[in-house]
Image: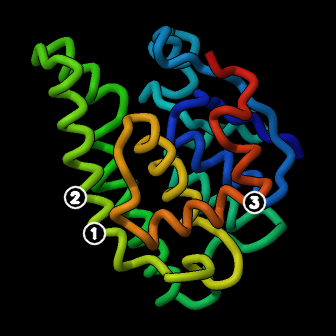
Amino acid sequence: MTLALYSYFRSSAAFRVRIALELKGADYRIIPVNLLAGEQREPAFRARNPQGFVPALELPDGSLLTQSAAIIEWLEATQPGPPLLPATEPERARIRAICGVVACDIHPLNNLRVLQYLEHELAQDKDARNRWYHHWLAEGFMALEPLLPEDGFCSGEAAGMAEAFIVPQVVNAQRFRFAVDPYPRLSALFERCMALDPFVRAHPESQPDRN
């Protein structure tokens, strides 16, 4: 079955889902939603996803899944292919905790709508916004670093859900000129992931809608 992913090439949440789809080898197509142009606020998109966020995954029956973690959990439960989570519940909880550092503690403070609010409502200039961005990255990466393996992947021999959350956050850090060298486990894990085709195919620079 062909899935349809509403995505913006630079959205780290959409990037997570693209990685998961690629790791699963799922059949999917991209429907681009330009966040900078405000397409997520247009009535046609709001009618499908009232929250006005990407990613959103449309199933063949027309139903729509939202929120990256929920979408990835659905992929794990329903799609064949390599597992994205370990087999045991304690290990699954550990991976979900790693994902939570990114999804709950870093990303919500640094996403596009927060940065736009800082600029337009609180009159913060670019330097102030970057200081904000870097502060919360440093807090999150410092917490994440000891949770990561020195070699291999978070679940063992293969990349999975944890890497799908971590890699987009590192790509964003690079875009905002935040050095990841002080986090050697994070840096090494990122390099291992970017040597894999699914991560390359899911990368923002590989997306046909980048602009």
**Viewport quadrant of the C terminus:** top right
Give the residue drawn at x 32%, y 55%: 104
**What amino acid type is highlighted by mark number 1?**
Ala
Disc 2 packing (10 Å; few <14; some 14–19; many ≥20):
few
Which residue position is annotated with label 1? Answer: 143
**Is 120 on the left-hand or right-hand side of 5?**
left
Q: Compute the Cα span from label 1 to label 3.
A: 25 Å
Mark number displayed over residue 196? 3
First along the sequence among labels 1 and 3: 1
Residue drawn at 33 percent across, 63 percent down: 182
Which residue occupies the foreground of this view, 148 or 118?
Answer: 148
* Side of 6 relative to 13 (left or right): right
Which element type, helix, strand or loop, lies under badge 3? loop
Residue at left offset 65%, top offset 62% = 193
Residue 178 in percent (x, y) is at 35, 44
Query: Where does the image place residue 101, in percent across and percent down from the top left?
Result: 34, 63
Q: Kindly state the secondary structure of the residue where label 2 is placed.
A: helix
Q: Please tell me whether residue 47 is drawn above or below residue 202 in the rendered image.
A: above
Identify the mark at residue 139; answer none if there is no mark: 2
Q: Position of residue 177 (x, y in %)?
A: 38, 38
Question: Which secondary structure, mark 1?
Answer: helix
Q: Distance of mark 1 from mark 2, alpha carbons? A: 6 Å
Quarter location, residue 203: top right
Marks 1,2: beta carbons within 8 A:
yes
In the image, 131: left or right of 148?
A: left
Image location (x, y in percent) of residue 49: 52, 28
Q: Residue furthest left?
A: 122
Q: Amino acid at mark 2?
A: Glu
Front residue of this view, candidates 18 and 137: 137
